[in-house]
Amino acid sequence: MQLENYIEELRQLVDVDCGTQTHDGVAKVAGIMGQLWQNEGWHTEQVDLGDKVGPGVFVTNKPQAKQFDVLLVGHLDTVFPAGTVAERPMSQDEQRLYGPGVSDMKSGLLNILWAMRSLAPEHRERLAIAVAMNPDEETGSVHSHEWIGDLAKRSRCVLVCEAARADGSLVKARKGMAGYQLTFDGVAAHAGNEPEKGRSAITAFAQSVLAINALANTELGTTLNVGVVNGGSAANVVPAQVTAELDVRFWQNDEYERVNQALTQLCEKGFLEGVTTKLTRINHKPAMAASEETQLLMRLVELAGKEEGIKVTWQAVGGGSDANHTAALGIPTLDGLGPVGAGFHSPAEWLDIASIEPRIRLLGRVVSML
C-alpha cells in the first residue's frame, strides 16, 4: 500500500469538525467517504436518518443483494465541538498520528475502504459486502441503530472497525450502557425569611445520589455514575429545580433490567417530600457478549492473523459501540478491526502508524475467508 496516500486521505477526514451535533461537518465527512467509494466503483448512497443528525452512508458491491456475507460498520462522528480542528489539526511524529477522531474512528473508516480496495476480484465477485457508516455513534446511535440493525439481520456476520486497543487486542465483548436524565422539581422560597415554605430540589438530588450509587454491583461490573449536575439560582434561594445526567454500564443485560427497574421505582417514590423526580432514558446499548457463533468467528480471525503473521489477542472493554446493538440481535459480531490507537475522546488521541498496513491486511484476509 502507499502509506502517504492513506495519511493524506485520513487528513481530509480528521481536519473536519464533525462532532455528532455538527451536522454540516458530519455531512462533509459522509460526502468525502461516499466519493472515495464511488471512485472504486462501489454502489454508494446517503441515508437520511432525520433532521436531528447528519446523513449515514451505505456502500455495497451488490446493490440487488437481499442478504450479505458481511456487514462492515464505522461511524462518521466524533465527540469534539466545533473549533477543535482549528486548535489541533492532524499532526504526526515518527510513530504516531494525532488529531480529533484520528483513531475513533476515521482510520477505521479508511481501513474498510483500503481492505476492500485490495480484495481479490474473485472474492469481490463471490461475496455480497455491505458497509454502513452512521452519524451518531458517539451519542448512542439513537437515530441509526435501527438502520444498522436491519442491515445486520440480513448479514451473516458484522465486523465493526473501531480502533484496536493500545496493546493491539481486538474486542470480543463490550459493556452495555444506558444514559438517563433526572429532573427534580421542588418549590422555591427565600432561604432566610421563610425556608419552611420551600422544597429543595438539591436536597432531593443529594439523597438520590446515595440511593443510585447503592445500585452498583462491583462483582458483576455494574456501575452508575452521576456525571453532570445543573441546578439552583442563588445561595439565598431554596432551589426549585435540578437536572442531572446518569451513566449506567453493565456486562450482563439482566443486570441492566434490575437497575432500570430499581431506578424507575426510586424516582416514582421520590427522594424528598414535596419534590417530584422525573426519570428519562436518553440512550441505551445492550451488552455485547461472545456467543458460540461469535466464538467461531473469533477462531476465523485468529486463523487470518496467523496467515498474515499478525498475533491476534482479545479484550473485553467498558465502552460501547455499534457492536453492542448488532450482537444483541444475535448476529455474530466482532469489534476493534481498525488500526491500533488510544486516548479516545481526549486531546491525547493517537494512532499507531506501523499498525495501519497490517490491520488492513488482517481485515481483508478475514473478509476473504468468509
Image (cartoon, rainbow, N blue to C red):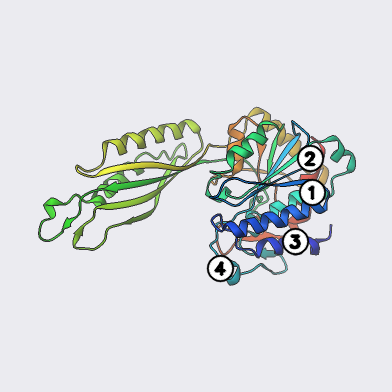
Earlier residue among tags 4 and 3: 3
Mark 1, secondary structure of its residue: helix
Name the residue located 75 percent from the left edge and 64 percent from the top edge: 8
Q: Are marks 2 and 1 in contact (CB under 8 Å)?
A: yes
Earlier residue among tags 1 and 4: 4
- Neighbours of disc 1 within 10 Å: few (<14), some (14-19), many (20+): many
In the rendered image, the vertical position of residue 104 relative to residue 308, given as above or below: below
Q: CA distance from mark 1 to mark 3?
A: 14 Å
Earlier residue among tags 1 and 3: 3
Q: Nearer the viewer, residue 181 or 304?
A: 181
| Residue 58 figure quarter | top right
Mark 2, secondary structure of its residue: helix
On the image, the x and y values in percent for residue 169 come to 66, 47
Specify the label residue 338 is tagged with: none
Residue placed under numbered mark 4 in the picture: 83
On the image, the x and y values in percent for residue 323 come to 61, 40
Amino acid type at circle 1 is: Ala
Earlier residue among tags 3 and 2: 3
Q: CA distance from mark 4 to mark 3?
A: 21 Å
Residue placed under numbered mark 2 in the picture: 367
Q: Are marks 1 and 3 in contact (CB under 8 Å)?
A: no
Q: CA distance from mark 4 to mark 2?
A: 38 Å
Residue placed under numbered mark 1 in the picture: 115
Name the residue located 69 percent from the left edge and 64 percent from the top edge: 96
- Neighbours of disc 3 within 10 Å: few (<14), some (14-19), many (20+): some
Name the residue located 65 percent from the left edge and 43 percent from the top edge: 335
Q: CA distance from mark 1 to mark 4?
A: 32 Å
Amino acid type at circle 3 is: Glu
Earlier residue among tags 4 and 2: 4
Q: CA distance from mark 2 to mark 1?
A: 9 Å
| Viewport quadrant of the N terminus | bottom right
Specify the label residue 9 is tagged with: 3
